[in-house]
Image (cartoon, helix red, strand yellow):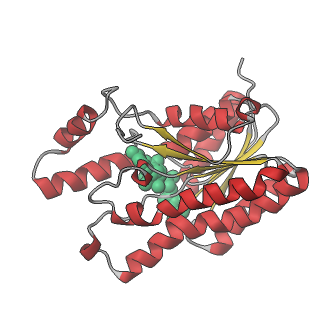
C-alpha cells in the first residue's frame, strides 16, 4: 500500500494530459487529495473520475487558463474551499510556441511571459500566505532541461523559463523560516503529446521523419529512451513527502543522463 502523501492536499496545474497528468496519477496513488487544473474540462473530469475511483482520493477538476489572472485565482480558491488548505503546489504549465527569435512576434513574447512566468508568480502569490499561516508547505516548479541546456528551436522556453530558477532560489531563501520548501524540476525529453510536436517541428525544419527525430533524441540519452510522465511524478511525490525534509532551493535534473554539464 502506498501512503507517502496520505491526507495531503495538493494542486497540480496543466494536469489534463502529459507530465501534469502523470504527476497527478502518482500523487493520487500516494494518497493525496488533489485539485487538478487545465484549460479544457472534459479530459480533467475524466482523469478526476479515474483517479478517485482507483485510489479513493478526492480529485477536484478546475477549468483554468494559466495565462488569465482570474482563472489562476480560482485554482487556489477551489482548493481552500474543498480542503481548507494546500500542502503542496505542483506548478506545471502549457508548452510555449516553438520558433527561432525572428519567427516570434511581440504578441508571442507577451503570451510566453504570461504562460511561463507570470502564471507561476500569480499562483505562488495566492498559495504562499496559506502555507506561511500553517508553517508548512511544498512548492514544486516543473520547468525544463532548457534551464541547463537551451534547445535550438525553443526560444521562448530558453529565455523565459530561466526566471523560474531565480524564483525557486529566492523563495527557498525567503520561505525557509516558515518551513515552506521550494524546488524546481528540470526534466529532459518526456513521452507526451508535446514531445511529438517538438519532434514534428524539428522534422519539418530538417526534412527527416518524426520517427527519425525521436530515434535521434533517444540516442542522445544514456538510458536510451524518453521518460514516462509518471517517472517525473515519482520525483514530485518524493519532494512533496516528509522524506524530502532537507531539500529546498534545488533545481533537480531528471533527464536519463542526457545533460553532460556539471
Ligand atoms: P502536453 O502538451 O502533453 O500537456 C500540456 C498540458 O498543459 C495540458 O494539460 C494542457 O491542457 C495544459 N495547458 C496548455 N496551455 C495551458 C494554459 N494556457 N493554461 C492551462 N493549462 C494549459 O505537454 P507536456 O509534455 O506534459 O509538458 C508540460 C510542460 O513541460 C510544458 O511547459 C512543456 O513545455 C514542458 N516540457 C516538456 C518536455 C517534454 O519532453 N515533454 C520537456 C521539457 C519541458
Q: Is residue 46 left or right of residue 190?
A: right
Residue name at image x 59 percent, y 66 percent:
119
Given the current orientation, which residue lies at the most extreme front position? 262
Given the current orientation, which residue lies at the most extreme bottom position? 106
Q: Position of residue 184 (x, y in %)?
A: 58, 48
Q: Position of residue 245 (x, y in %)?
A: 75, 35
Residue name at image x 77 percent, y 50 percent:
176
Q: How many numbered discs, if any? A: 0
Quarter where residue 239 is shown: top right
Q: Is residue 129 left or right of residue 18?
A: right
Residue 39 visible? The answer is no
The quarter of the image holding the C terminus is top left
The quarter of the image holding the N terminus is top right
Given the current orientation, which residue lies at the most extreme right position? 133
Q: Is residue 120 above or below residue 48?
A: below
Given the current orientation, which residue lies at the most extreme top position? 1
Residue name at image x 73 percent, y 29 percent:
243
Q: Position of residue 227 (x, y in %)?
A: 41, 33
Q: Is residue 132 above or below residue 66?
A: above
Q: Is residue 109 left or right of residue 4?
A: left
Quarter where residue 102 is shown: bottom left
- Report the front residue among 139 and 5: 139
Residue 148 visible? The answer is yes
Quarter where residue 22 is shown: top right
Amino acid at each position: 500500500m502506498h501512503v507517502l502523501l496520505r491526507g495531503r492536499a495538493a494542486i497540480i496545474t496543466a494536469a489534463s494530459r502529459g507530465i501534469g497528468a502523470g504527476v497527478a496519477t502518482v500523487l493520487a496513488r500516494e494518497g493525496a487529495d488533489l485539485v487538478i487544473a487545465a484549460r479544457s474540462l472534459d479530459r480533467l473530469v475524466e482523469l478526476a473520475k479515474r483517479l478517485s475511483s482507483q485510489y479513493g482520493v478526492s480529485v477536484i477538476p478546475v477549468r483554468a487558463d494559466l495565462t488569465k489572472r482570474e482563472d489562476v485565482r480560482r485554482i487556489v480558491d477551489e482548493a481552500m474551499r474543498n480542503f481548507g488548505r494546500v500542502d503542496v503546489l505542483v506548478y506545471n504549465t502549457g508548452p510555449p510556441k516553438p520558433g527561432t527569435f525572428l519567427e516570434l512576434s511581440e504578441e508571442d513574447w507577451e503570451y510566453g511571459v504570461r504562460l511561463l512566468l507570470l502564471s507561476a508568480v500569480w499562483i505562488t502569490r495566492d498559495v504562499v500566505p496559506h502555507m506561511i499561516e500553517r508553517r508548512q508547505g511544498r512548492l514544486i516548479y516543473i520547468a525544463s532541461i532548457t534551464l541547463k541546456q537551451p534547445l535550438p528551436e525553443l526560444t521562448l522556453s530558453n529565455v523565459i523559463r530561466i526566471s523560474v530558477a531565480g524564483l525557486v532560489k529566492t523563495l527557498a531563501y525567503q520561505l525557509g523560516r516558515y518551513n515552506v520548501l521550494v524546488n524546481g524540476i528540470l526534466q529532459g525529453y518526456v513521452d507526451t503529446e508535446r514531445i511529438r510536436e517538438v519532434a514534428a517541428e524539428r522534422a519539418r525544419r530538417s526534412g527527416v521523419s518524426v520517427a527519425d527525430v525521436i530515434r535521434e533524441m533517444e540516442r542522445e540519452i544514456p538510458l536510451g529512451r524518453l521518460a514516462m510522465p509518471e517517472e517525473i511524478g515519482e520525483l514530485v511525490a518524493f519532494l512533496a513527502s516528509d522524506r524530502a525534509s532537507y531539500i529546498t532551493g534545488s533545481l533537480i535534473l531528471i533527464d536519463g543522463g542526457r545533460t553532460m554539464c556539471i
